[in-house]
Image (tube, rainbow, N blue to C red):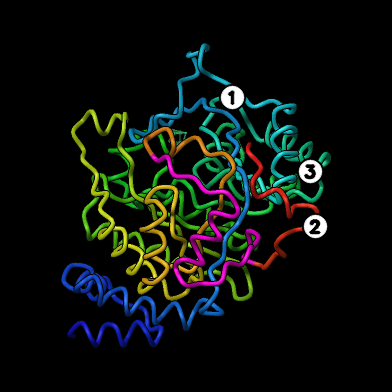
Amino acid sequence: MNNSDIYRKALALDPLTEGEALQIYRSAPLAELMLAADALRREQAGDPQVVTWQIDRNVNITNVCISGCKFCNFHCKPHQSDKAYITTIEEYDAKIRETLALGGDQLLLQGGLHPKLDIVFYEELFRELKRRFPQLRLHALGAPEVAHIARISRLDPETVLLRLIAAGLDSLPGAGAEILDNGVRRAISPGKPDADTWLAVMRIAHRLNLPTSATMMYGHLETPRQRIEHLIKIRDLQAECPSGNYGFIAFIPWVFRSSGTRLEREGVVPDTSAAEYLRIIAMSRLVLNNIRNIQASWLTVGKTTAQIALHGGANDMGSIMIEENVVSSAGAHNSFDAEGIQQAIREAGFIPRLRNQKYEPRPWPLPGTADLTDANL
Ligand code: SF4
């Protein structure tokens, strides 16, 4: 099959085989890949003139983690009492008030695999946050955290998810997927649940109709084939999702940032080129024919590359992220406020539309927030 036949197959929403996807990933000119991915975005992602964006805040539950990911500068070990923290209710309260004042509707709650925080801790936390702020959406944890909480609470992951949903969990981020290959994961995240566990937890979440997203962190030890295999595993899991359930609402690839990480000290040099990022975005759109939203990660690649990605398969600019600590601690220092992200979308030739985590539109400006775009938090 030549490359044109493969594009035709992708545009017909016929799933590409691993060999077909690898062929165009390795050999097609970038402009050609982007053109095909853009054509598919216009078919798949709603109004082709619109690019969505979001306001949320990333708050870290704790920085204590036993996973030991070699790409992470954020975590510390349980015995590092000078660094270790667990965010207090008072701190959440202040951060949530700021987030709501800026028009945000959601907390992205993430943390480490803390050896002592079990299901009861998370149930109490989610219940208290929802008691104080019933309108707040909790996009929280991730498949590795769910598996970890299940292990230390002596429960199965389904029970953990059911109890977290009952306590206020609204959606499950795709964090911790990295590359869904057990060899790569053992090398970069020695203490993290394996690829099969990530997929198994997400399968349960889909069965329970909990909205989820999926991610990929590329550019470290993985091969091009493992990147394509990752995309196909995500697509195949989405194909198993019961009809009418949310499944993966979005896919977000980002590039490994090495600054100060253990992988950098071990000599791993990431491929941070804009061209490779744009190839990944285009391949995400072409392979993930059953996931509607592909997000440009401006935080890791910057404004200009994210804007170009909107013409090569991406239809979403992500969140202005009022606070982010994990990727920033490894050298990603881009930032946007609400006006800036909308301006960036307009400059790229699209109409910005605020959304929530389920990609449902929200009005902008929100009542009472019209003057807050210059707020300096
Ligand atoms: S990336 Fe997450 S799981 Fe890995 S060490 Fe950092 S906090 Fe822990």
Q: How many marks?
A: 3
Q: Quickly name the residue at label 2.
A: 367
Q: Position of residue 125 (x, y in %)?
A: 72, 35
Q: Is residue 251 above or below residue 91?
A: below
Q: Position of residue 152 (x, y in %)?
A: 57, 31
Mark 2, secondary structure of its residue: loop
Q: Is residue 285 covered in magenta? A: no
Q: CA distance from mark 1 to mark 3?
A: 23 Å
In the picture, the quarter occupied by the C terminus is top right
Region of the chain picked out in magenta, as a range? 332-359
Type of amino acid under label 1: Lys
Mark 1, secondary structure of its residue: loop
Mark in the foreground, 3 or 2: 2
Residue 116, numbered label = 1
Query: Is residue 118 toward the left or the right of residue 286 in the image?
Result: right
Whichever of labels 1 and 2 marks the residue nearer the N terminus, that label is 1
Q: Is residue 351 covered in magenta? A: yes
Q: CA distance from mark 3 to mark 2?
A: 22 Å
Q: Quickly name the residue at label 3.
A: 130
Residue 271, numbered label = none
Residue at left 61%, top 67%? 353
Residue at left 64%, top 27%? 87
Between 93 and 80, the residue placed more toward the observer is 93
